[in-house]
Image (tube, rainbow, N blue to C red):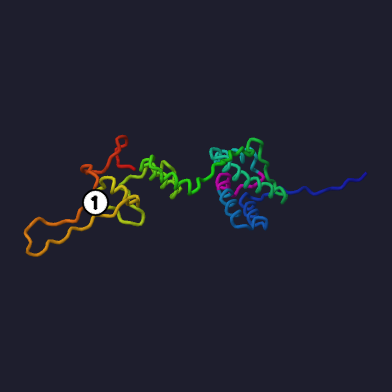
Amino acid sequence: MTGKIMPLRERDTTTIQAAADAFLSSPRYVNPNTRRGYTGVLDRLLAGLGASRPLAEVSGEELAGLLEQLWGRCAPATWNRNRGAVAAWLSWCAASRLPAPVLPASAGRRREHLNATRAVPRPAIERALSRRDVPLREKTLWRMLYETAARASEVLALTIEAPRPGRPPRPDPVHGRRHRMDLLGLRHRAPAAPPHPRPPGRTGVRLRAPPWPRLPPRGPGPVSCHRTGPARL
């Protein structure tokens, strides 16, 4: 019985950087959005593992520990997305006969919590803003939340002295409700008419147009919150 002598295969010395570059240059990932997302994940992975290290020296436990360190505290959707990019790279390396590690079971996918919350339609917002039993502060808050898509904490943290975007800051201090309405772009009445000029030769009392009714003054200084101090909505 005769045997056949096969030459020993040399150890693969492909580096992690070379394997990542070949993976990103493959025709399968020609989509620019997919390539950009995978590039960001692999760049952070290479920075933690070492780009010049041979791929054969990387173990699955080391890779799982780095994944936990980078994205372990993120949301399940973020973890699954980044883990999927790494798993796609390792699968490509295995199909290309490169010594790629295998992710252990501890680095598996995580269960995502689906959010079925739907946006409130605009007619419902308009009906809520037209109610007379809702205070003006609540209507302003609802309008800003709907129009800006900001968080409630961000809108409530706005101060009255904050300048409006695209306009210079107000030089004089902010006083009263009328100024707050003007700051938010919700001016509720036209300004008062200017006084009539005094006719020549008249020495009587100066005639003025009847002014619009105004709110009582609040005193000097900005309107302050009784809890936090600075002026707020």
Asked if residue 53 lies in the magenta stretch, the reply is yes
Dominant SS in magenta: helix
Quadrant in the rendering for residue 56 = top right
Q: How crowded is mark 1: few (under 14 residues within 10 Å), some or many (20 or more)?
A: few
Residue drawn at the location 20% of the way across and 58% of the way down: 194
In which quadrant is the C terminus drawn? top left
**At x 23% / y 57%, what residue is drawn?**
193
Q: Measuring 22% from the left and 43% from the top, which residue is drawn there?
A: 216
Rendered location of residue 161, percent (x, y): 30, 47
Q: Position of residue 73 (x, y in %)?
A: 53, 38
Whether 23 is drawn above or below 142: the answer is below
Q: Position of residue 231 (x, y in %)?
A: 30, 42
Find numbered disc 1 in the image and state the secondary structure of the residue it sits on: loop
Asked if residue 1 is among those painted magenta in the image, a careful observer would answer no
Towards the viewer: 173 or 34: 173
Q: Is residue 152 left or right of residue 67?
A: left
Q: State the residue in front, 131 or 144.
A: 131
Q: Can residue 147 be seen in this view?
A: yes
Looking at the rendered structure, the kind of residue marked 1 is: Trp
Q: Give the range drawn in magenta.
A: 44-56
The residue closer to the viewer here, 100 or 116, is: 116
In the displayed structure, does residue 69 sit left or right of residue 91? left
Q: How many labels does the image show?
A: 1
**Quadrant in which the N terminus appears:** top right
Where residue 120 sits in the image (x, y, percent)? 50, 45
The quarter holding residue 24 reads bottom right
Residue 66 visible in image: no
Please give the residue where the numbered disc 1 appears in the rendered image: 212
Q: Which residue lies furthest to the bottom in this view?
A: 200
